[in-house]
Amino acid sequence: MPSRALLRFLWFGVCMIGVTLHAASSLAQGGIAEIDLTGRLSAESRWFPQAALFPGQDAHASGFVVEPNLYIEDEAGRILNVTPFFRYDSADSRRTHFDLREAYALFSGALGDGDWELRLGIDRVFWGVVESRHLVDIVNQIDLVEHPDEKTRMGQPMAYVTWSSDWGVVELLGMPYHRERTFPGGKGRLRASLVIDHDRVEYEHESGKWHPDFAARYSHTLGLLDFGASIFNGTAREPALGLCLDCGGQPGQPGQGGLPVLYPVYNQIRQYGLDAQWTTGSLLLKLEAIRRSGAPNLAGMEETFNAFVVGGEYTFFSLWDSDADLTLFAEWDRDGRGRRATNFYENDLFGALRLMLNDVQGTEMTVSVLHDLDRNQRIYGVELARRLTDTFSLDLGAVAITNIDPDDLYYDLRRDSFVQLGIIYHF
């Protein structure tokens, strides 16, 4: 039987063939104003300096990423945009996965004193302004196997309407299908002591993943202030975790033969969000805040709570009369649930330095730290990006997890600090 990774790669190939045939058919019919095929091929490697905590985990993982983008625009201004994504990972079969990041048709026009756009298909929508944590950004599901910083998002099926005019921008989203969060497998690093079994997923609503979700946002600029107010009603993107003590099946497999596993439970929630940015020259002051109801806390009890991220950034332009810019970040992350929170950001300070050389190679480096104010634990991060040639670039990153409290939600990750290297070909 073919491996799961091979089947996923074959499915990726079938999708790409279909996209190419569609583009060829459109060109044959005429009326195409622009067509562009770009993307990236990346060879990546991760190294974990510390010995694994659980059996079967490796100290090294390698793989590759294929992420092309097809853009077609006709003479009427209608757009087709398709961005498939495929990752292969040598160590974790769960990290080997395919996703359609984007696959939508875009229509636009004028309405009254403003302009409208309609996107139908799969898209990614970003809301927010802060650096450490994308708190109000709730439309797209997190692709957690990509990186533990929770910033990589999966494609979301949607109908997405925007209307913009002098008085602001209104966004309306209808989402007919829920995407489940990805989690590492039994042999993957950065996982909990109990494996999360995707096959046992539960939904609070009887419609399951087909429950319709709705979201809306209004944003505007008033002088130096940019702000947005949003609402989301539907299936949570962050799952609660249920415990299965005896799941049956074949002995020796995670969650089978009486071995316990965790499984995702997706509740119905409502979230109100606010994001704002005040810009004064080199200084940016930022805020993201939410109020969420319907989600369970770490104790498994439903709790309405508030959370916020407040801080800012300051940029020193032309550092020491050079072409380089240096940006300083400082933010405070606070979750009103405290130690009942289901994430790392209970009460944390975030600080970072970003150096951009603005050279021909586009060299950029970021050093960051997330410090828990209630405990003495920290997460350090380093990111370096540099173009090697016109078509090749290098990404180097590292995450160090230190002093994790034994009572903390992320104690199982205490040996999972890692260094990551990627060589990317851009086409």
Image: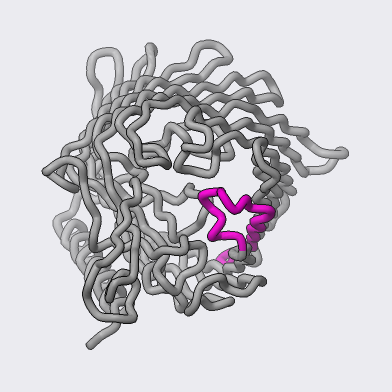
Q: Is 380 in front, or is 248?
A: 248
- Tell me the residue at 36%/44% (across/down): 238
| Farthest-out residue, left | 206
Residue 399 in picture, x, y percent from top left: 63, 58
Q: Quick check: 198 left or right of 193?
A: left
Residue 164, x across and y down, in percent: 33, 21
Whether the magenta-drawn stretch holds residue 408 is answered as yes
- Does residue 73 appear anywhere in the picture? no
The residue lying at 77 percent from left, 33 percent from top is 316
* Residue 45 appears left or right of 136: right
* Colour scheme employed for the rendering of this structure: one colour
Magenta span contains residue 134: no
Report the label total. 0
Extreme bottom residue here?
A: 1
Q: Nearer the viewer, residue 12 or 269?
A: 269
Instruction: Please state if 282 lies on the left or on the right of 13 as rendered.
Output: right
Is 240 located above or below residue 393 in the figure? above
At 69% across and 39% down in the image, what residue appears? Answer: 351
**Residue furthest right as drawn:** 320
Q: Please state the extent of the stretch shown in magenta in the rendering.
A: 390-414
- Determine the residue positioned at 22% across, 35% down: 213
Quarter of the image where one finds residue 60: bottom right
Residue 301 falls in image quadrant:
top left
- Residue 86: horizontal and vertical position, in percent? 37, 67
**In the figure, 213 relative to 392: above or below?**
above
Across and down, in percent, residue 326 comes to 75, 40
Of 207 and 173, the residue lying toward us: 207
